[in-house]
Image: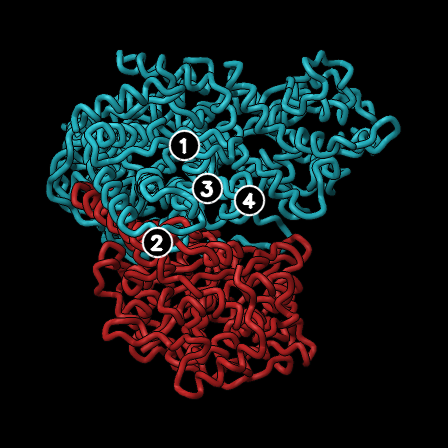
Amino acid sequence: MPAPITRRQFVSGLSAMALGGGLLGLTKPARAANGLPFLYVNTIAYGGWDTTMLCDPKMNPDPKNPVTRAYTDPSQLTAVGPFTLPDPNKGAVASANVLTFFQTYAAKLLAINGVDATTTQHDEGQLVTTSGVTGATYPVLGGLVAAAYGTGMGAPFMSAVGVSTQGIVGITPLDASMSDALGTPMSGSGVHSPAAWTAVQAAINNRLARRQGAAVLATPASRLRLYRAALDGAANLDSLMAAANDITSSVPTNGGMGDVGASFAFDVAITLASYLRGQTVSAQLGFGGFDTHTQSDANQVASLDIHFAAIDYLMRAAAHVQLQDQILVHMGSDFGRCPFYNGYDYGKDHWPTTTVLMLGSMVGGNRVVGASDDGVMAKPMDPVTLQPSASGSNITQGHIHNNLRRFMKIDQSTVTAPYVIKTEVDFNIVT
Amino acid sequence: MQRVVLKALLMALMLPGCVGNTSGLMNANTSKTSAGDEANGSNSNNSVPLVDDISGLADGPLAAFVQRVWAPTASQDCLACHVTKGYAPSQGSAFMLQPPSQPGYLQANQTAFSTFARRQVNGKSYLLQKVTNQIPHGGGVRMQTTDARYQGIDTWLQASFAASDLALADSKLKAMRLRDAIATLRRASVQLAQRQPTAQEAALAQQGNLDSALDSVLASPGFGSFVWKVYNGYFSFSTFLAGNFVASDRMDGGLFTHDQRYWWGTAGFSNNNGESAKSENSVAYQAENLAVYLVQNNRPFTEMVTANYFMANPYGARTYGVFDKVTWQDPNNANEFQAIPASSVQTASGVPFPMSGVLTLESLMNTYSTTASNRNRKRARYVYSIFLNTDIMGLAQSPPDLAKIIASSDPNKPATMNNLACVSCHTLLDQVASDFANYSPYGAYATNPNDIYPPVPMGGAGFEGVPVPSTAATRLSWLGSQIAQDPRFADAIVSQWLLALTGNPPLRDPRAGATRQEEIAAKLYQEQVLSGIASAFRASNYNLKTVVKQLIESPYYRAVDANVAVSPSDAVMLNSLVNTHWRGSADLTAGLQAGMGTPWVTDRVYGDTLNQEYAALMTGADATGFSARITSIMGSNMACFAFYSARYGYFTGAPWMLPQAVTNAEDPNSTTGAEDIQQAIATLIAMALPLDTATAAVEQDATWKLYQQVYSTALANPDATPEGCIGGRLLPYVKATDEAWIAVLTYVLSDPELLFE
């Protein structure tokens, strides 16, 4: 495993960059004519987050059956631009990290409240927030992005959690053992002469071409195509660790990240380094602890604290490598939580109305779109004005995914064609 | 080259435990379908996709039912309540549907609808009047007459049904290239026994007796390891124990004293030989060892949930205080596991030691732990999933009916028994959950459930409407007997082994996402195959080997590719037969072990590099730059060490299986040398790769050309040879030979066929 770079090396790298070179030899990925000009990151808050503790707070129309016990008075809420949040400094049971996060990133933050997840089942909720559909198994959006833009990349789609791309593109698991794999040349160490290795590589390529030419059905053909892509990308992963080590050694983790701190920092560093190398175009991350069937308020606060401290780390790391304007973070959860407590120690069960957050220079920040009523039911929205309208439609994850597909210009892609999300109307929230 | 091929096959058969691949199936050289053909079609959150053209592959009555009624409506809107012991029958409804876990559920549901659909009231369909609430319906209005789902049911009701879906599906299979008996045997032997087939097994397969050949493979110790691994995936106690906990911590302190559970720390023992680990492993992996015991002794696999005995080695037996009650072949052998009657255990509290297969084991209790609010529902959910083939969550209505939830919500009553959105699942789930009420989150047993948690209303212990009888020894022993009698048990085991053998779970139940007729036909065909295997499993008194053999002999294990060009629609179904998975670190290691005689051994991590170092990256889920990189490193690294081992006697502990000719330095330009080298290449490929005859012949030519190229280049420039693997002390032509062989080995070990399942 390569040794982490020293601070002196890092400073030297910065100097080189200032003189026109890249950071540690890295340069921002060139924006190809048809390429995606940013890194797409999707996150799941596993279990279903309570939107009333995020940016869709509710008062209690029925004190005997309250929507929330975390706060009881509007004075316990704080406005951050267009966002309204429960404020722990005003006596609300709320996440301080959420408030800080919104204060820090409001200009790049878009909140979509009142999203109809259309399900209260975890499996389906995790599918719909990552892929936009229930009832069918589609690739997650990060997978579609990688399939469309990641040809030839060594790790087009990285994931720290279990998701499916339906085989259209390989998922690179984010794991610490990556450092070992990156520390050894593909030809082994001192095994072959350059000429022999060249000959072996040529023979391998010829063999693969023969097999691809013989494949008839899509399944074996797809398998070989993915292997071809993996081989193409594998050699491009050299030197990734040096760039990752630079990030982890230069960007301190936040104590609020809790137990996930070190591993999350590694995942972020590898992802950003790989993006900088032009080897990754999308990533999937996740956070647990949101399925709060008991002690919901306290447990939500703990999980929200970690979640938003971690996303803050991601943004600080991105800024360190000057990618702060080349990253889109799409945050969601399985669904929301009930507008009432269950009978188990103030737990909250599953509820289909949720909130989706988008973070990035390109999303048009400082905005809240969509809404839910006092009972946390999604309000129908006019697809043109994006304002509540009785004749409008509930915003669904399908609408949001279609919007993002259009925004990222993959809606007409051949890789997306088999995975159409049909909706009656389109919502153009991110343009 | 033909002579070389035949000679190589003969040589491979002469090698200990080695056989070549002689699949004689034709090559595919026809036009291809698009990659997208394997994927689902379009879908919508807001609309109900229907295919208007009922023709072609699935032009039969069952397909029409699935397409018009089951997928868009019944599976999503009716099943949640109209299921056995569900909410609707509890309210007096006689209209019953079967969930996807039931064998032949589609046919049964078609029959249920057909019978129901004949009923007329006032000259109109009773069914259509029910769903629109024109005749009062307990579930209220489910759809309007203008709804596409209503139109779908109406169309189905009026349709005339004639053709057989399955006959059409069968006809499409003729376009599929399947592995022949020898290739199937080889694949099964490598995967399940981590070895090449024996000459006797190969002979049986060649004589057309694949079943007997598989009997021999499944009798080998390696199959036990495979079974162990499969069930370790379901009862991953080892994962749960990560951290400071050990298995003895999670044993019941009321049943077994501290000194008993930690006997190696008491007087008379020293723990010098790792007694604690040997004991902990025995306790932790009882579920896996029970599965192995049942298979190796041809016992009914239903004992997984009914066994009134437990598995322990001599060390684990001390933990349970029964070491002296067992006759051990070797009391110091941690790998000797015996089935020990629960009745032989004297518990500390004096209560009979409760035992009903895995249902009562620490591994289940801890892998699927519980909380004060969960109340064993997680355990119940996984019992349904693992042993009853039922996804409880899948029974729920989607999207949920918020009006129902709100209307029936009452903070003073448990939603699970009152809220209409909850009762459909919880009616089934909560009874089984209550069967576990005697167990704490960590599995400690209490004779009085109230000692674990104070009682809450959950409907009482039982199984699908039947309460636990007062005569039952324990709730879980009674539950185990119910599961063992349930036809879904066999289906569950068949589904598990389809996944274990092919990497593919059963096809999804056709719902709104399945818009193509061919997907429905693929599901129907699979239903037929798997139901047949489940029936055979039951008829064999639940001998697991019956399931394994029949799955191996089915198209789901043997399909390779189409042998002719097929239409895009036919391709949808044929693609469902082909497995798409890559080998994860464990399976790839098994392939290397069988093909090369050793896992990836390096000087850095002497043992098993793939499993010890790269298991997280080599999940088998996908091909990525990282997995390609690792396998590339592996190919070169193994080639180097294999060659050194064979030629110079290094790493003699690793039993490399290289052809003899590899160790000879022969001039490839001489007639004898060329022939010997080609022979060695052919044998090497036959050993290492699961290729059919035609593909193997092509590979032998390509490999021979690579050998010649590297040899001549190295001979011309001996100084370029790296020091790491060859060294600089050899004569040029020897170095050239060595380098050529290492290149060849690298090339063979990089074959994608080695990387696929």
Tell if the residue under mark 1 belongs to the same chain as the one under mark 3: yes
Between label 4 and label 2, give the one nearer the viewer: 2
Screen quadrant of the N terminus of chain B: top left
Q: Badge 1 is on which residue?
A: B596
Q: CA distance from mark 4 to mark 1?
A: 18 Å
Q: Are the residues at dot 1 and dot 2 in contact (C-beta closer than 8 Å)?
A: no
Can residue A3 be seen here? The reply is yes
Image coords of residue B91 (percent x, y) = 47, 37
The cyan chain is B
Mark 4 is surrounded, within 10 Å at the Cα level, by few (under 14), some (14 to 19) or many (20 or more) other residues, namely: few
Q: Are the residues at dot 3 and dot 2 in contact (C-beta closer than 8 Å)?
A: no
Q: CA distance from mark 1 to mark 3?
A: 16 Å
Q: Badge 3 is on which residue?
A: B585
The residue sitting at 39% across, 53% down in the picture is A186
Tell if the residue under mark 1 belongs to the same chain as the one under mark 2: yes
Between label 3 and label 4, give the one nearer the viewer: 4
For label 3, the SS is helix
Mark 1 is surrounded, within 10 Å at the Cα level, by few (under 14), some (14 to 19) or many (20 or more) other residues, namely: many
Q: Is residue B162 left or right of residue A240?
A: left
Mark 1 / mark 3, whichever is N-terminal: 3
Image coords of residue B61 (percent x, y) = 20, 31
The mark found on residue B605 in the picture is 4
For label 2, the SS is helix
Query: Observer-nearest residue: B94 or A223?
Result: A223
Q: CA distance from mark 3 to mark 4?
A: 15 Å
